[in-house]
Image (cartoon, rainbow, N blue to C red):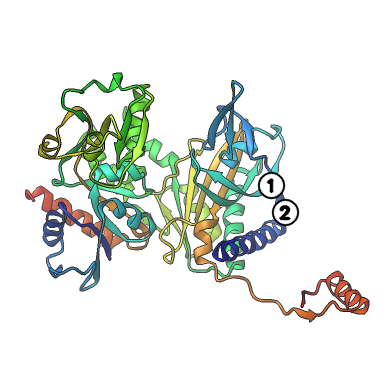
Amino acid sequence: MNGNWVNRSEKLSDLGRVLRRNFELWNYREVLLPSIEGYDEALDKGTKFTDGGDFYLVKPDITSQILTKLNPGKSYKLFYISEVLDGKTDGNWQFGAEYIGGDERWMIIEIITAIITGLESLGIRDFFIDIGSRAVWESVTSDLSVEEDVFNALYHRSFDMIDDLPIDDKKKNEIWELFNYRDKTCEYERLNGILEILDDDRLYADFGTVRGMSYYEDLTFEIYSPEVGSPLGGGGEYSFHDEGACGFAFNLDNLVENFPGPEERPREEISLNSSGKLKRAKEQVEAGNAIEVI
Amino acid sequence: MQIALPRGRMLEDALELLRGAIPTLSVKENRELIHSSGEHEILLAKPADVPVYVEEGADVGITGKDVVREKSPDVFIPLSLPFGGCRVSVACLKGEIKPPEEMKGFRVATEYPAITEEYFRSLDVRVDVIVVDGSTELAPRAGIADAIVDVVQTGNTLKANGLEEAATIMNSSALLLVNRIAQKTKFDQVNKLIYSIREVIGNGA
């Protein structure tokens, strides 16, 4: 077995352990999900395959997978650790949480605060969270027939796509200003109120932030660190049977690049060469103390 | 900033464009793959690797639309650049040419498996894709493929190898790529570079 793979697995597992503890403290419950689901249009991503004329998905997007299993009208605070496939055979490990059916204003505040405590409990303090708003974009593009093109341009941050839009220059400039808006406060009252309550220097209003999943509604956010070239994670608001919801996922494969690793705990070395030593080892473990059998 | 540039046919044009946008930029003419120039570091990579470098941490990069479409990197693509023009085409041996719709069961050699599979899937034509790493034109002549999908600039290489274009899959030119995190952490620097490049392009680079 490849030693680097074992070390990396251990580090991913440590990440999961610390984040699991953090979200349990916030009263989120862990859910375990099957690797294979019957094909359902409500499921995003995953790798399709067919067997005996039936269609299946391997490791689909977890948020959409969770939503197919919940009863409407209830409140849920859930978290998971799972691998997600890209539609082929490449996957990445995710830690995510979903808050469904809570107070519309406070769900995103709680989720972002739990993300901050989670990152800090991992020893990661050099990060930023940029929050964008779909509602703001919709208010700018609602009178245009090119709303989807604007979102595509935004997703790729493409000047060319904006230049090619069949709209007047004044509107293009308005779109450009929004593209490049990134500050501690903004004119969108709802987002501004949330930033004020969260009161953290690492948070920005950034209308250039968009997320690819189709189920997101107003606020979406992206978590990143100057130390890592790819986003650490992201999430946003969505709805479930008319109930508000908010969720996010960390990309553990990126997060692990930023993770200093757990602190080594002291471990008593015990040689199991007598029943007395075996008893000692058992007592130590039962007392919650780490041992190393030599 | 760390800037990844493609070695080979696009390099001179890419450097000329960058020198227009960053007048202080200088890259020595030697075989080194990393060059420092003031606050910038230039990485010279294979064109197909530039999207990977930018996705994984280089701040910006320049490479062809063909390799960007092949690799589908999670990067920003703010600008098309006015050089590196070429097309990705299907070609067969002269005299054996068929429309792609009639290539069912063909063995197709290519350095672009994703583009090839996507193209034939869109035509609902099942083919066997054979991945090769360069000199794709050899494959039909060696009898290991019935067709190829490859980059075509003038068509001279195809002609010299007894091949003929059956269809164009896409037109390509150079693109400017920006790392998603650099766009946030180096917001002003990256935007300044993009606007300078736009100005250079506007002035007829």
Q: Is residue A165 above or below residue A110?
A: above
Q: Nearer the viewer, residue A184 or B27?
A: B27
Q: Is residue B205 left or right of residue B118?
A: left
Determine crowd level at label 2: few under 14, some 14-19, many 20+ residues with C-alpha closer than 10 A.
few
The disc placed on residue A27 is 2
Tag 2 secondary structure: loop
Provide the chain ID for the residue under circle 1.
A
Tag 1 secondary structure: strand
Q: Nearer the viewer, residue B90 or A68?
A: B90
Three-letter residue code for mark 2: Asn
Q: In this view, does B58 lie above or below A187?
A: below
- The x and y percentages for residue A215 are 52, 36
Residue plotted at (13% across, 56% down): B17
The disc, 1 or 2, on the residue closer to the chain's N-terminal end is 2
Residue plotted at (48% across, 35% down): A214
Residue A148 visible at all:
no
The disc placed on residue A77 is 1
Tell me the quarter of the picture where residue A72 sits. top right
Residue plotted at (44% across, 63% down): A228
